[in-house]
Amino acid sequence: MKKIEVSLNSKSYPIYIGCSLKKIGDLFRKYPAGEKILIITDENVSNLYSENISRSLISIGKKVDIFVIKPGEASKNFEVAYELLKKCSLFGMDRSDIIIALGGGVVCDLAGFVAAIYLRGIKFVSIPTTLLAQVDASIGGKTGINLPWGKNLIGVFHQPYFVVMDIQTLNTLPEREINQGMAEIIKTAVIRSKKLFTFLQKLEKSQLHRFFSRLVYECVLIKKRVVESDEKEEKGIREILNFGHTFGHAVEINSKNLNHGESVAVGMIGETYIAFKKGLCSQKLFKDIISLVEKYGLPTRSDVSASKLVDSIRYDKKAKGGRSRFVLPVRVGAVKTGVEVSPEEILLYWEKW
Ligand code: ADP
Ligand code: ZN
């Protein structure tokens, strides 16, 4: 088991990578807390993993209750959050008790949000079980729910007590979910790591599962360093994590069939195309990113029209003063932030590509 410490101004916490969920009680023993634990999870993950965790926690004397939500983004809303808060109250949880999020990004965002607002904030342990959540959502302290007109529009920063990742849980993940995670891993490589980029190029896709542990570790380390230098996203450093996401979010909102990772893949290619056309990066980088995206089973295009894209980008919550700011690659491992691209340019480049 590996441990990465995230050191923030507000709080520091460890991320454990490669901990068997059957033995999670041993880890909880080290952390002072009340005796009650509420596990928040979804139906799929609950069927696979909640039994092991509950048993291990009960064996160290914890009182465990579980709340199972329906899988999928639609559960990230006020109604479900309200039901969860009610559950916390009925279970008699106080400030010393712990909420566990067991699942993918949806569960982690929602459970983190509830932990952040119940009694003005209680302890929160995140156990991400998707590749996407392990390499991305689990670090950074962002929690939240959706509003009917937009994703993650309500939320707060709430750092976890600690994070536990069992790499074995990735073995039950459907391939499309693995591919989604690969999109964030490719993004991480482009923005910060030539070493990781080269590794992804050389890796045989059929051998991917053998390297999950290494990939997760590398990405967590990179994201930790970025988040540590800009905890609340105020200094512009954290902005680099947004590579592929300006277009990506717009694609995700408008596309009927692409998930987050797939949209980010399309977004990375669109944004790199702009970088290439603006003379910021080479055509080789553009081609190399396309090859990686294809290799890991991700789409390179979407059917979203340029005009819809421009409209959505205007309303992106990261747009400042109505202008779209892009993070564009310069070379592998380096990006330029805050590049303004006009709607006319977007229309032109998107249609061309
Ligand atoms: P993300 O945003 O991380 O992709 P979601 O919470 O939307 O996460 O989860 C994606 C889907 O994968 C959900 O249907 C969820 O139930 C399922 N899932 C999550 N973890 C696992 C796992 N380890 N094995 C199988 N299915 C899983
Ligand atoms: Zn993302």
Image (cartoon, rainbow, N blue to C red):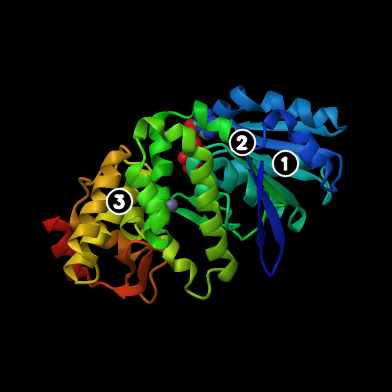
Q: CA distance from mark 3 to mark 2?
A: 31 Å
Q: Residue at the spot x=82%, y=29% of the render?
A: 58
Measured as percent of width and height from the top left, residue 39 is found at: 70, 36
Instruction: Mark 3 and mark 1 in contact? Answer it, CB < 8 Å.
Output: no
Which image quadrant: the N terminus?
A: top right
Closer to the chain start, of discs 1 and 2, is 1
Side of 236 where 351 appears, left or right: left
Badge 1 element: helix
Badge 3 element: helix
**Circle 1 is placed at which residue position?**
86
Q: Is mark 3 within 8 Å of ligand 2?
A: no
Instruction: Mark 1 and mark 2 in contact? Answer it, CB < 8 Å.
Output: no
**Circle 2 is placed at which residue position?**
166
Q: CA distance from mark 1 to mark 2?
A: 29 Å
Tell me if mark 3 has few (under 14), some (14-19) or many (20+) residues whose alpha carbon lies within 10 angstroms of its own.
many
Side of 284 where 244 appears, left or right: right
Measured as percent of width and height from the top left, residue 204 is found at: 35, 35
Instruction: Judge by depth and name the residue closer to the eye, 201 or 45.
Output: 201
Badge 2 element: loop
Q: Which quadrant would residue 80 be assigned to in this image?
A: top right
Q: Residue at the spot x=77%, y=25% of the render?
A: 55
Q: CA distance from mark 3 to mark 1?
A: 36 Å
Amino acid carrying label 1: it is: Lys
Instruction: Judge by depth and name the residue closer to the eye, 290 or 57.
Output: 290
Is 142 rendered above or below residue 99?
Answer: below
Q: Which quadrant would residue 87 be assigned to in this image?
A: top right
Q: Which mark is residue 251?
A: 3
Q: Nearer the viewer, mark 1 or mark 2?
A: 2
Instruction: Judge by depth and name the residue closer to the eye, 20 or 8.
Output: 20
